[in-house]
């Protein structure tokens, strides 16, 4: 199995991908053979991809004020 980064291209009412000939030769596949393509969208934000999106009930400012009160409240 190999990984190839490519872009979707419109072909009529469909989309398609172009695979480099070198990759086709390395995998020893030929025209008409059935292949399986695993598709994953490239994401630009690595942190969001890794950790997801977090939603808090309190705003950041409110959490910081509460932390300050706990630390400095004598």
Image (cartoon, helix red, strand yellow):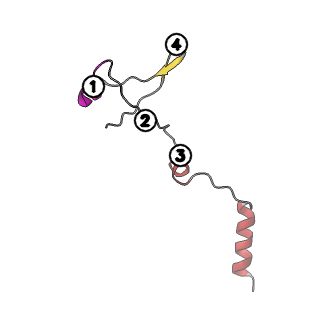
Q: Residue at x 51, y 52 (%)?
A: 50
Crowding at label 2, few (<14), some or many (≥20) Cα neighbours within 10 Å?
A: few
Q: Secondary structure at mark 2?
A: loop
Q: Quadrant of the C terminus?
A: bottom right
Residue located farthest toward the top when viewing the structure as drawn: 12
Q: Quadrant of the N terminus?
A: top left
In the rendered image, residue 39, in percent from the top left (x then y), is placed at 46, 35
Q: Is residue 7 above or below residue 72?
A: above
Q: Would you say the residues marked 4 and 1 are in contact, meaning their CB atoms lie under 8 Å apart?
A: no
CA distance for labels 3 and 2: 21 Å
Q: Which residue is mark 1?
A: 29
Q: Nearer the viewer, mark 3 or mark 2?
A: 2
N-terminal-most mark, 2 or 1: 1
CA distance for labels 4 and 1: 25 Å
N-terminal-most mark, 2 or 4: 4
Q: Which residue is mark 2?
A: 38
Q: Residue at x 71, y 74 (%)?
A: 68
N-terminal-most mark, 4 or 1: 4
Q: Residue at x 56, y 50 (%)?
A: 48
Q: Foreground: 24 or 8?
A: 24
Q: Which mark is residue 12?
A: 4
In the rendered image, residue 22, in percent from the top left (x then y), is placed at 26, 26
Q: Is residue 51 above or below residue 69?
A: above
Read off the magenta span: 23-31
């Amino acid at each position: 199995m190999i990984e190839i980064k490519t872009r979707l291209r419109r072909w009529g009412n469909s989309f398609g991908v172009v695979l480099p000939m070198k990759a086709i030769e390395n995998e020893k596949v030929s025209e008409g053979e059935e292949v399986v393509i695993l598709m994953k969208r490239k994401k630009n934000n690595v942190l969001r991809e890794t950790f997801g999106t977090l939603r808090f009930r309190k705003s950041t400012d409110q959490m910081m004020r509460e932390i300050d009160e706990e630390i400095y409240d004598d």
